[in-house]
Amino acid sequence: HPIITREALEEIGGYAFNTLRGLTLIGGQVKIDPSLLPDMLSAMDESGYGNNPTGMILDLIKPAALTFLEIESAAMERQQQNDEAAGADKDEKDGDDRLDVNWSTLELDFVLTQKSYSLSINAMSMLAANRPTFFEDSARALALRTMDPPTSQEGSNATDTPHRNAMLDSALKKGSVKAIQSQLKASCLTLLRNTLSVTAGGFEILHKALISIGMQIQADKALKVAKQQAALRKAGRAARNRAAIFYEWEAAPDERSSKRQKRTDDALAQMRSARAARGLGGGIQLPDSMTDACELVMLNIDNLPDQRPPGAAASSTDKRKGLTDLASLIDAVLSNGASLAAEKGKWYTRDGGGAWTLEVDDDAMMVEGTKEMLRFALDPKAVEVAESIVTKGKVDTDEAKRYDGQRAEAASEAFGRLVLRSSTARSKRLVDLGNQVAARLAWTLRNVQPSADLEAAKNLAADSIESLKKKCVEDSSDDQKAMEASAIVNISKEYPLVPCCLTLNMTAAAQTGEEPTSALTSLSGVAPSLANRTLSEAYMQSFGGNAACAAEPATPDLYEGTLDMYLSSVVSTCGAANNAPNDAQQKRAATVAAASLPQQLAMLPALGPSSLQITSSLCDIAEITKKATEASRKSSDKTLAASASIHAAKAAAEKRATQALFALRDAAYQRSSSQSRRSAVDCAVGIASGRLPASPVVEGNALKLVMNVLYVKSADIADCVVAAATEELERTAKYAADNFDRIQKANEEAKQDDEAADANTNPFKPCSDEEKEVMDKMRKPVVLFMALCVRRPDIIKTLFAKGSREKADALAKTITVNMSKLSKAAVTKHGAAKVALQVADMVDESETELFLSFLDNLVQKSDKTPPKQDLIDACHTIHEKRVGENGKKDMRYIIPVLSGMTRDELNTKIPDFVAADDDIFKKAQRRMSERLMKHALVFRDDPGKGESLYGMTLCEQLVFLHQLDFAAVGLPQKRYLKSIEICLEEDKMFSDRVLMAALDHISGTFLTNQTKLPLAYMRTIILTCSKHESLHSWICHVLLPRLVEGKIYEDRRQWEGWMRCARMLENTGEGVSSLSAIESLPEEQKIIYRSKNPPK
């Protein structure tokens, strides 16, 4: 293989084997760390996975393998530590060789059922037997699983082990556990008998596992046999001879097989005897030798019927009279007497030979070298009737009707012979010549029904036409499709042989049971097939490309209808194979139809939009996918074969869908018509965006086709992809607007049902099932367009414009939910600062919300990676440029990068955020502290010159907010105090501990005479007493005495607040009182306090 090397295969095999060991030992898949999983948009670069299939495979299996290896290494290390702590010697360790896993703490993505267990155990056994490299590890895995088998909640062994995993135990029933344990015993015994257990290693643990479950006798015998067989490989001839004599008894013939073979031979002899006794049967084939043929005819004269069969004519005079000659005798033998019932005047007999008469000139026979010895002439009666039909132009007499019927019958049978014989020819040139003649005849012979030999092709064509009509009836709103279906029906009625030519290759391959050859279908050869020749002839008929139809006007619908008929037959054949997974003929026909589709379409002169849409319907395999999903849930042994058949049918359907994608790719690449290229791209984009029905796997393949194949091919195709994706986004926006009222009504009902919903719930989460359904449907086109935005950042403007449309709230919410994917990929490809400035220059005021979400997602949500300085500068630039109508700057543009700014810069921005709306103020507080949540209770000291502190902890926010000189910055006092109340209301962020830390820091600086108490300080303490009872004790015994020590009574306003707070906590009735703080006051202040607050 040019890409997948042997080293890559070995790496894939190693990870796959570790994944299989993990499934066998754990009994399910341990939950994988999301950080190990690849991101679709990040990995979707210009090359994608197209040149590195190894990476795609490793991304699928490597996370699961690494997760199990981590658990296995931790278990082995834990077991080694336990052994060292116990001081056990080697013999004691051999007694407990199990995997030390804490089952109760395992988080699992899924668990294995009985069927899955059986598959994993069989896979391990086959690997051990066929790959000696994996024998020892496979044997160890099966032995460990045997010593520690799975349990069930119904069994007693589950209750005896308290640290089992509830998810693992609930997956199996008691009977399933016993079956798995029996299979494990048998697998270990089989591997122990294998000579590889001695040569490759592993017999010790297998032997130990069988002994632990009470099978020591069987284990000893199996190990003995394995060692003997291993010794025989290096033994001499005498030892090998003795071994052969020893096994002679086991190789004795089976008496039952001999009896069965005898019965088969007897039945075959009886069948041959019966065939010989029947004589002619249904007619015989004469040998090539004339002598043998005459002898066979004479021997079978006695087998002819004694009486003539009843003829079609009513009177006895219509029956044939005259002497019986050799020709009539041969016809009777070949047809088993049916030719004796021939009507009088029927000229079409013996392959048309009955229409001719032979005249022999006896005189000329005597002259040597003459060429006029034999003369052939048409039957005069037939010539007379034919001339009358041509002269009158109509069929009016009984003889004319009979002749016209025989003419159609002759044409039908001759056409059938031509098609069938040309399909079995060995010469490609002869095949192509027969296909050309048959295609021309199919469009020449009007109203001629196909012969019985083409019955299967006729039925398939009829089914495809009916399915197309049914689909058009279901989609009654599309008048264009109804007209196309009507044209197809008219073509099939006027030219009945054409549908048979289109479907013959599929039915012929299904009946032969062999893979199609170039002579039959021309899949890989250069010669066009019969269907292709028929379509080419239809193109010539439609546009007047030959002399035969030069007098007739061009009818483009003829070619388009014929092409739609062919593609409908392909879709119908594949659909029948999906509905009947066990029908081998249907599967072969579908395989031939789908495999030949890209080549057939590539050779056609033109492709229309309707034809490409029909081709895209091959991707609609939702029904078979649903069946496979339901079958995988059933784990009984009775449904195992049916489930395997359905899964095989699903895999075949996905391959056929891939062929349809290949056909769309070729149409976009090879067609010179811009309409054909655009139609192919529209279909591919429609499948990737979910508009055209397809399974998730096919949709993923279509997305890769659009992004990694079509878009990078050329600028012209890339423009078509962007245009098609824009149309899909426009449809999505219209769909969101049409469902706006329904979503609003459902959201109101859901809000009334859930009145206790948390106010801090994610605002972009769907509020109702209706909204979730609409958002799920819009997600795929949005993600597709975002992937294009990574390649072309200038179309981000289009995305935001569509999402900001009136009543398209669901679309805006869908874009916001998936905005992180776009931002992350754009940062990786273009850089955060560059793309932020570029998008800022494009968006309008109506698109501000989506642009802010884009900026917010440009910053990585990680404590170790703060925003870079270039992004911070870019956000400041945007903040300066985008000024509102009132002349004020919008502070929301710098919120995303607040965590990367220094504390001093943030301190200067606090007045602007306080002056803004409440929501903006809250978002700014979250951003400032999002990377410092571990230090929320700390007020960091200034590190000095040359170093800076970034971000602002919650404690620092409260301190700086209290120290804010609102009058100097032009803030109203009311707004300033309101901002402090907002902080106290956000008790989840500014908890009681954060408040205590901030108040403690302010009081500490006040006590050391560094600063004065802020104006709102005592007001904040009073509000804290009302909101947080947990701080009453600290305020009474620590804070209030500290303020007394700092002589708070010297400040009249602060002293009034202190007395009010002390009064609130003096008699709380909870065992906490401020009396100790009151008693610490100087005598004069105590008198003032008691004068205003006398004791109760």
Image: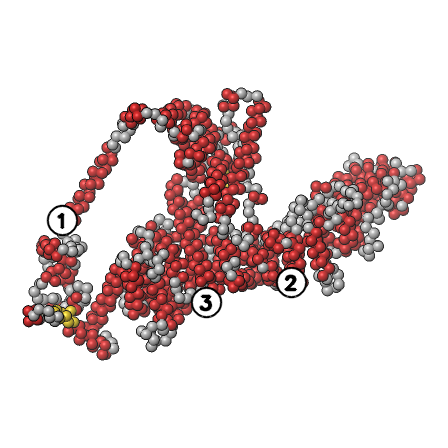
Q: Answer whether residue 986 is visible to the viewer in this image.
A: no
At a point 43% along the width and 27% down the height, the residue shown is 203
**Viewport quadrant of the C terminus:** top right
| Image depth: mark 1 or mark 2 in front | 2
Q: Position of residue 277 (x, y in %)?
A: 13, 49
CA distance separating discs 1 and 3: 67 Å
Q: For the residue marked with disc 1, what is the amino acid? A: Ala
- Find disc 3 in the rendering and name its residue: 673
Q: Answer whether residue 1008 is visible to the viewer in this image.
A: yes
Q: For the residue marked with disc 2, what is the amino acid? A: Met
Q: Describe the element under mark 1 as helix, strand or loop.
A: helix
Q: For the residue marked with disc 3, what is the amino acid? A: Ser
Q: Are marks 1 and 3 in contact (CB under 8 Å)?
A: no
- Find disc 2 in the rendering and name its residue: 842
Other residues around mark 3 within 10 Å, as few (<14) / some (14–19) / many (≥20): some
Rendered view: 979 above or below 635: below
Mark 3 or mark 2: whose residue is earlier in sequence: 3
Asked where in the image residue 547 lies, by quadrant, the reply is bottom left
Foreground residue among 574 and 493: 574
Rendered view: 1086 above or below 45: above
> Quick one: which residue is furthest to the front in this view?
369
- Find disc 1 in the rendering and name its residue: 277
Q: Report whether 423 appears left or right of 266.
A: right
Q: Describe the element under mark 2 as helix, strand or loop.
A: loop
CA distance separating discs 3 and 2: 34 Å
Q: Report whether 685 appears left or right of 258.
A: right
At a point 37% along the width and 69% down the height, the residue shown is 539
Mark 1 or mark 3: whose residue is earlier in sequence: 1
Foreground residue among 1002 and 365: 365
